Amino acid sequence: MLNIAVKAARAAGAIINRASLDLDVLKVGTKGPNDFVTEVDRAAEQAIIEILLEAYPGHGILAEESGRTHGAQRSEYQWIIDPLDGTTNFLHGLPIYAVSIALAHRGAVQQAVVYDPARNDLFFASRGRGAFLNDRRLRVSRRTRLAESLIGTGFPFRKGDNFKRYLKMFEEVMHACAGVRRPGAAALDLCYVAAGWYDGFFETGLNPWDVAAGSLIVTEAGGLVGNFTGESDFLHQREVVAGAPKIYGQLVQMLAPYTRVIRDGDLAREPEPVAEAPVSDVAVAALPEPAPRRAPLRVRKAASPGAGGAER
């Protein structure tokens, strides 16, 4: 199954690389404000689906552009596909984008491939067999102090996203770590955690196809992945935090007050109008300033769903 996923990812990557040579002729549409889709996204997705279903016609498909319209509807196996994660980067010629393919069995990701076609870098993992970049075994970083850590993130970009809530998180994390980076492709961000290039990562507003493959790659590299409360339920919560074990724990303590999973108790919700956007793009409810720090949260190891300078 992993070999078929690699074949599909490379086929999609070839389509993306050819298109990157002449970006001016691309047809570009929008799914919402600042949420772009190109003919390349659709062509790459179609190539992936054809290869997967030719090999496994009884499997289901969940893809970013076509949803669940292809494949079996009631299969225990489901391929989760993002044909081009980082479309905005791609449109501007910024070579930070990837193909992401995961296979879940009964909701747990078993196989994962993230392919960076601009660098011909292949990140992959099979449950219980480790994570790799090309032919090199991956391990998360050994850092234990958040103050020394480099953290990746993603910015809210859709109309209706709760920028105020995010900026509070961003400010708190940035003051606590060595630096924050935002390349713009969550699948690669998670792979960078697995490779030890980042020590941690957090983002809100993500969909299953953004994080399914990368999350298995992180856990197979010895890292942890969960929602902002440290639970393994993150695929459909639209929030994720990942990192080396010690850094993950510190990030969870910091981000827990901002989770959308916590709805009662000390965190009263503020009303915020819902944006006129597709249901999958509706922003999470606004949250106020985080509650005063309480005793450290007990952080449980998150099962895979299936994976100082002037510049800061």
Image: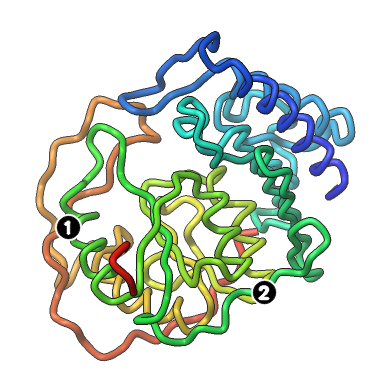
Q: Quadrant of the C terminus?
A: bottom left
- Badge 1 local density, few (<14 within 10 Å), some, or many (20+)? many
**Does the CB distance between marks 1 and 2 fall below 8 Å?**
no
C-alpha separation, residue under disc 1 versus residue under disc 2: 35 Å
Element at badge 1?
loop
Name the image quarter holding residue 39.
top right
Residue at left 74%, top 65%?
131
Q: Is 115 displayed left or right of 248 in the figure? A: right
- Badge 2 local density, few (<14 within 10 Å), some, or many (20+)? many
Closer to the camera in the image, 102 or 38: 38
In the rendered image, residue 180, in percent from the top left (x then y), is placed at 36, 62
Query: Which mark sits nearer the N-terminus, 1 or 2?
Result: 2
Element at badge 2?
loop
Q: Is 164 displayed left or right of 64 in the figure? A: left
Closer to the camera in the image, 205 or 167: 167
Q: Nearer the viewer, mark 1 or mark 2?
A: 2
Residue at left 65%, top 59%?
306
Q: Amino acid at mark 2?
A: Arg
Q: Amino acid at mark 1?
A: Leu
Residue 175's place in the image compared with 115, above or below, is: below
Residue at left 64%, top 38%?
81
Q: Disc 1 designates what residue?
A: 287
Closer to the camera in the image, 243 or 1: 243
Name the image quarter holding residue 14.
top right
Residue 294's place in the image compared with 178, above or below, is: below
Q: Disc 2 designates what residue?
A: 139
Q: Which mark is residue 179?
A: none
Residue at left 67%, top 58%?
108
